[in-house]
Image (cartoon, rainbow, N blue to C red):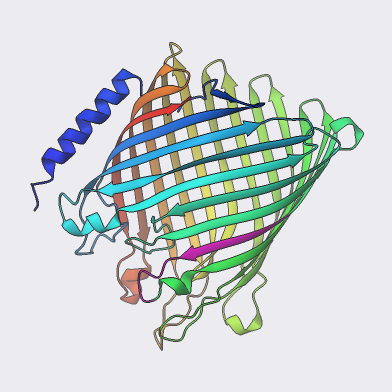
Amino acid sequence: MKTTRIPAFCACLAALFILGIAGVSAARGIGIKAGEGRLHPAIDLDFIYDTNPGYFASDNTNLAGDLMLRIRPGITLSFPSSKVSFELSGKVGYDYYFGIDNERTSDLSTVSGDADMRLGFNPDGRVSFFIEDNFSRTGDPRYTSLAGRFDRTNNETKAHLQIKPGGGALMFDVAYGFFIDWFDETTVDSAAMSSYAHRIYFSGKWKFLPKTAVTVDFDSDLRRYPNSYSWGGDNVGVNAIRATVGLLGQITPTVNMTVKMGYGDTLLSDSYGGDDYRSVIGQAEVAYRSGTTFISAGYVRSFQPVVMFVYFGQDRVYARYRQQLAGKFTVTADLSFSWMTYGTAIQQETADQGDRSDGLVFGGLSFNYHIQDWAEVGLAYDVQARFSGWSQAQGHGGVDYNKHIFTLHAGVDY
């Protein structure tokens, strides 16, 4: 076990604490005037202890906790206008792992960040057109049971048309997006997980009462994987579609409800050899808001394309509680459980991968103190756990894991 990095940890912890107490993002400040717009500088500093930063399985010999310093400076530049509006926001920084328990975890250190851009033409008119872009860079695996560092770039560029006839009671949105999820070639087969997709979106909303609306939503994800694995296998592309119809309504002055139901299908080709995801999908949520109290709970059923297993269907129940105290303190609690059923795994050589279903539990509790509207410090605790009978039944490497995350946070968004 390494001990020489502990003083560095203590020094960084002390520095972060001093910055936080001195006034180093609950809300955004007034910013700095930039012509007709506003420039909002921001920074997030998080000191994190993670018992399993690489999402390693419980039986993995590389399993070790570590300290991480996450630095995220950023800006938001906003030019509101009824004719041509523009907003650009982004944060980029470094995730530094100290390697205190096992020096191998220091290899998880990487540059990460995200950025969003939205250019609107006649944004407040009956017919509006937007060009949007969403970019992110991360090394977090988050894909099925992958563990370790998987640096990748996500980006979606979207053309978005919005029509609001009838004084706004009706609203229609149509959009096309080109999406990439591109992995760096850090391992032999990481490039084989890269994908691109053509995405189509449609949404219609009819507000037939002042606080109640009917919605119709459709989206498609035509996902393709251009690269092959070293052993000759290929990830399977999907032509996913999802369509729902629903109701958004305010039941009482403090209670809102969302109900959506529809159909989802992966539309896989006959050459796949496995089952399609063809099922009812939807969402039901109830939210309560009164004064400084917010409570919500709901259920979502849907599916997503994924590497190695083509897709996974997900049934997720969730709840959130948020309470503001004395105008300066905010307590937030989150809890969710997801049951995920996977498609037929792509076959590596002649191995029988078998069927797979996983349970995923998440819980979080945070406490924040708002020094100003635009500055905060806080503490948070998160727990995640995955359990599955797939690895034990098929003799593969483990996929079960659990992790506990303790965070000291300081943030400014001026």
- Residue 24: image x %, image y %? 35, 24
Q: How many marks?
A: 0
- Residue 239: image x %, image y %? 67, 69
User: Image check: 166 left or right of 413?
Assistant: right
Which of the 4 image quarters holds residue 58?
bottom left
Give the residue at x 65% y 50%: 282
Which of the 4 image quarters holds residue 167?
top right
Give the residue at x 59% y 52%: 301
Is 178 a magenta residue?
yes
Q: Which residues are magenta?
A: 176-188
Give the residue at x 68% y 53%: 158
User: Image check: 45 left or right of 334?
Assistant: left
Is 181 a magenta residue?
yes
Question: Is residue 127 at all visible to an observer of this figure?
Answer: yes
Question: Is residue 308 at all visible to an observer of this figure?
Answer: no
Pick whichever, 324 or 189, lies toward us.
189
Pick whichever, 36 or 368, lies toward us.
36
User: Image check: 148 left or right of 64?
Assistant: right
Looking at the image, which residue sits at the far right? 166
In the rendered view, tell whether residue 240 sits above or below residue 401.
below
Looking at the image, which residue sits at the far bottom? 350
Pick whichever, 201 or 295, lies toward us.
201
Give the residue at x 49% y 33%: 320
- Residue 347: image x %, image y %? 45, 82
Pick whichever, 169 or 31, lies toward us.
31
- Residue 409: image x %, image y %? 34, 31
In the rendered view, tell whether residue 353 sits above or below residue 375.
below
Looking at the image, which residue sits at the far top? 326
In the rendered view, tell whether residue 330 sits above or below residue 142.
above
Q: Main secondary structure of the magenta part?
A: strand
